């Protein structure tokens, strides 16, 4: 259930910056992987562990970005819960980085 318009405006201001920071962080992680894949020498299918790792990382980051798209469609209160759940699902290094950014911007 969505909150009233005034309350939504206040909570949207809190939730959306977190989503923007997470999206920017994931895009910063994905951009060099995309570049490495583009510049990678032609691999032998299924035999190049580094290339396969890059493909897996790109797939994972694309899924995370898709999750953010879905979160942005939710109400502000749902967004806060979804962002917390999203952060809980990240690996320790990314969770720590994003949590620090969230704390310093508050």
Image: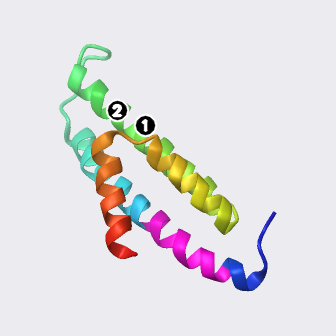
Image-based side of 91 in relation to 51, left or right: right
Q: Position of residue 105 (x, y in %)?
A: 36, 75
Closer to us: 52 or 44: 52
Residue 98, numbered label: none
Task: Please tell me whether residue 59 is drawn above or below residue 94 in the rendered image.
Answer: above
Magenta stretch: dominant secondary structure: helix
Which residue is denoted by mark 1 in the rendering?
59
Could you say whether the residue bearing mark 1 is in a helix, strand or loop? helix
Task: Please tell me whether residue 67 is drawn above or below residue 28 in the rendered image.
Answer: above
Q: What segment is highlighted magenta in the picture?
A: 9-20
Q: Answer yes or no: is residue 66 visible.
A: no
The residue at 32%/48% (across/down) is 94
Closer to us: 3 or 38: 3
Closer to us: 51 or 42: 51
Tell me the quadrant of the picture where the C terminus can be found: bottom left
Whether pointer 1 and pointer 2 mark residues with C-beta atoms closer than 8 Å, the reply is yes
């Amino acid at each position: 259930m969505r909150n009233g318009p005034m309350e939504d405006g206040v909570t949207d201001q809190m939730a959306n910056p977190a989503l923007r920071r997470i999206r920017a962080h994931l895009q910063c992680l994905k951009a060099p992987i995309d570049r490495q894949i583009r510049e990678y020498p032609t691999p032998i299918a299924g035999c190049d562990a580094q290339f396969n790792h890059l493909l897996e990382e790109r797939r994972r980051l694309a899924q995370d970005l898709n999750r953010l798209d879905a979160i942005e469609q939710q109400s502000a209160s749902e967004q806060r819960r979804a962002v917390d759940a999203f952060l809980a699902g990240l690996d320790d290094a990314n969770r720590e980085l994003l949590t620090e950014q969230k704390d310093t911007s508050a």
